[in-house]
Image (cartoon, rainbow, N blue to C red):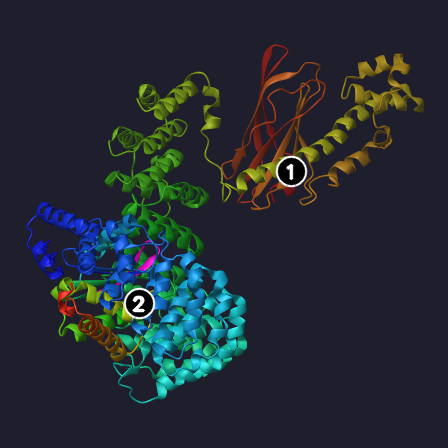
Amino acid sequence: MQFMLLFSRQGKLRLQKWYVPLSDKEKKKITRELVQTVLARKPKMCSFLEWRDLKIVYKRYASLYFCCAIEDQDNELITLEIIHRYVELLDKYFGSVCELDIIFNFEKAYFILDEFLLGGEAQETSKKNVLKAIEQADLLQENQSEDWGGLAAEEVL
Amino acid sequence: MPAPIRLRELIRTIRTARTQAEEREMIQKESAAIRSSFREEDNTYRCRNVAKLLYMHMLGYPAHFGQLECLKLIASQKFTDKRIGYLGAMLLLDERQDSTLVFLSGWFFNNTQYVQGLALCTLGCMGSSEMCRDLAGEVEKLLKTSNSYLRKKAALCAVHVIRKVPELMEMFLPATKNLLSEKNHGVLHTSVVLLTEMCERSPDMLSHFRKLVPQLVRILKNLIMSGYSPEHDVSGISDPFLQVRILRLLRILGKGDDDSSEAMNDILAQVATNTETSKNVGNAILYETVLTIMDIKSESGLRVLAINILGRFLLNNDKNIRYVALTSLLKTVQTDHNAVQRHRSTIVDCLKDLDVSIKRRAMELSFALVNGNNIRGMMKELLYFLDSCDPEFKADCASGIFLAAEKYAPSKRWHIDTIMRVLTTAGSYVRDDCVPNLIQLITNSVEMHAYTVQRLYKALLDDISQQPFVQVSSWCIGEYGDLLVSGQCEEEDPIQVTEDEVLDVLEGLLASNLSSPVTRGYALTAVMKLSTRLSSVNRIKKVVSIYGSSIDVELQQRAVEYNALFKKYDHMRCALLERMPIMEKAAANGPTETVQTNGEAEPAGLEPKHPPTIIQPANQANDLLDLLGGNDVVPVISTAPAMKPASAGGELLDLLGGLSLSAPTPAPPIPMSQPPFLLDGLSSQPLFNDIATGIPPMTAYNKNGLKIDFTFERSNTNPNIAIITIHAANSTEAEMTNFVFQAAVPKTFQLQLLSPSSSIIPALNQGPVTQVIKVLNPQKQQLRMRIKLTYNHKGSPVQDLAEVNNFPPQSWQ
């Protein structure tokens, strides 16, 4: 995978994960164009489209579009499964996740994504293990705050 | 100083902004606060501030001043800080910053696997080549750890390192030894990814890892056969992600290798038949299986199975599956053409799909499936598609139709009809390079000229907006306007068209705003051409002279030149505006063909030239011999041709007076001393020329010192075309200037006259002028030619007409 974008139906970016080195300017340009292209698609159309020399796989969950750019040799159908797995992880973590959860807790959405994918590939295929790792990391945060004093874990950010 | 506003608070506040300007103001205020907080080196709230900065960055606002702060967070002891710090590094930093030192701290000062995991994640996501080079060793170590949490991350990190610094691939080789013996699916999955990357990049690695095929097959088998595993289950399938990755690696390992392909045959068949297809996840595995089957050296039964799976995909309700099927079929249509043909009707149905991507693939696939057997049916569907598809498809569809029609047209009429249909429905989307191709096609369909021009004319009456169509039509009207007016159409009922009506249409094109400059050019030339085909020459003259003052420079130039043609060069007008000859297939062939014939003709021309011209003086010399008697006159005769070939007998007599003068001439006496009939024999037996065809040359004209010989060749590309090279020689003492050779042939023939080598024929046979004529004789009728010669000789113009009937039979049979 080269990158993953999450955006709302109004085109507002909620998450952007880039696995290829690009300048900020290029990222902005790509984001703008791709968001426009995907939002212009009609509901009856299939989830894949060719864009530049990449394959774009996208799926809408409620008010959020999940959009991945994969390479020629990658399997589009399994990418749909990857997207679905990510949504399931978010759902399990936040408890019936909605767009607002991702807006207000974007850093957590990133943490979960980074436990699921690394360098654009899945690092863990077990839902349970991903969630366990996040849980442990969260616990570590809490425990450290307790041990070292200062701000409580939930007050840091 | 009060504590900086909390992250969620900021988000809430910014979301209340009602306008972009209001939001910008809020952001700017907060940015300033954050900046001053950074300046004060506030450790407690650095984390909070960077987090806020990351949020603002996502909204599109600048955040570069936080880059250094991320590094400080990473260096902090607190896990919360590190977490945000690494995230910030991934979002705000890019390869250009050298942050190696920062990562090193991750290894040395903190043993928690979660911190090391963060570091591996960041390196694997955006590590620069330098960073990768520096830390590859650490990654390699972690690749061998027994901690599966870190091992799986190290594997993907290694993938990134290899992508950035391919030379480092070797160092990871030892660590891969027992990667596949892992039970942990995370490690297995990432290991397969790593192995895939290594095999794709290095053929040596590929051969090295082929031995893993049995192990991979075993793992895959276990996944399929094992019972329900809650941890990895997705809709009844055990770890589809791992299955797909293994199938992909098997594809790479089996490609081009018989043994490996054999070893995976069974498992592929098993996966293909046993996988549940009701959900997307099963189809994802089937898709990958099909790709693998098609790429490796699988047995034909398996291949047919794969294509049938794709055929079933085509009927699936899920459009994603249909899309994927069409893409795969497109890849396999070349190699497994017959198997794909079986699904042709389903593919053609996909042309009517609503989805643009599916339509495009169906179109490409349809073109790939067209052959001589299904051309009529397929073309019907494709033309219907052309009518109704979006504009973005029309150009490609039109080009594809033209190509298919050219290859498989069952009849000329069908071909022309198809072209017309495309021109009239998608005429403005037809590519520019199609116009000359179509014109050439129409020209070569000799029997269809009347029909074509009639149909084009009728269509033109309806619609003149589609430029490529209009261009082709006006060209045809210009060429075949006489057929149009004479109403001789065999294929359908002829329409009554008057000359004025035709000219009305063309003038309309010239005047219309819809016509592009190129189209106008075509129309004007067409009008001009009609001056030799129709009788309304005055009207045409008027039209042409009007455009002599056109603003369009190209049009003006054409009109002025055509005007000149009417005035000064009227005698050439007919020849210039003659019916176009058959054109050679591609432009590339044309000129080379000409060069070849000229090249061959030149030396060929020279060879026979000598014997014939020498025959004459020899003949005359024989007469002289008779007159004078005695053999000692022979050397005189041999030299005479060299010095004054074909000169009158009187000159010889003069020479006879001065024997000593003629002695040292270097003329080749040997051929001369041979009796004339042997020379004749030489010229008729093609030893030097016409080796391929054996057509004897002939003298076409010989009067007043001008002698024109024809030599013959057959065209290599079209046996109906005879290539005649004329050799015009001037035996008089004065040169012939402004020499123009014209030829006319009966109606069933077509003639093409190429440029002469020169318009001056030097005196005394010193250098013949050559010119190439191409004659197309599709009906193999006896070749006859009427020639017209004009030249200036000794200050006065000479003109002569002659009939040439003595063509050797081989030249037209």
Q: Nearer the viewer, mark 2 or mark 1?
A: 2
Q: x and y percent of residue B371 in the render?
A: 42, 61
Identity, as a three-letter code, of the amino acid under mark 1 = Phe
Identity, as a three-letter code, of the amino acid under mark 2 = Leu
Q: Secondary structure at mark 1?
A: strand
Whether label 2 touches label 1, CB < 8 Å: no
- Vertical position of residue B323 compared to residue B444: above or below: below
Quarter of the view holding residue A87: bottom left
Tag shown at residue B181: none
Stretch in magenta: A49-59
- Vertical position of residue B476 compared to residue B366: above or below: above
Q: Secondary structure at mark 2?
A: helix
User: Viewer-proximal residue, B675 or B488?
Assistant: B675
Q: Is residue B757 left or right of residue A108?
A: right
Which residue was labeled with disc 2? B118
Q: Name the residue: 45% across, 34% down.
A: B579
- Vertical position of residue B60 compared to residue B495: above or below: below
Quarter of the view holding residue B453: top left
Q: Is residue B642 left or right of residue A59?
A: right
Within-10-Å neighbours for mark 1: few <14, some 14–19, many 20+: many
Which residue was labeled with disc 1? B712
- Vertical position of residue B211 compared to residue B50: above or below: below
User: Viewer-proximal residue, B688 or B728?
Assistant: B688
Are dots 2 and 1 on a single chain? Answer: yes
Q: Is residue B811 left or right of residue B525?
A: right
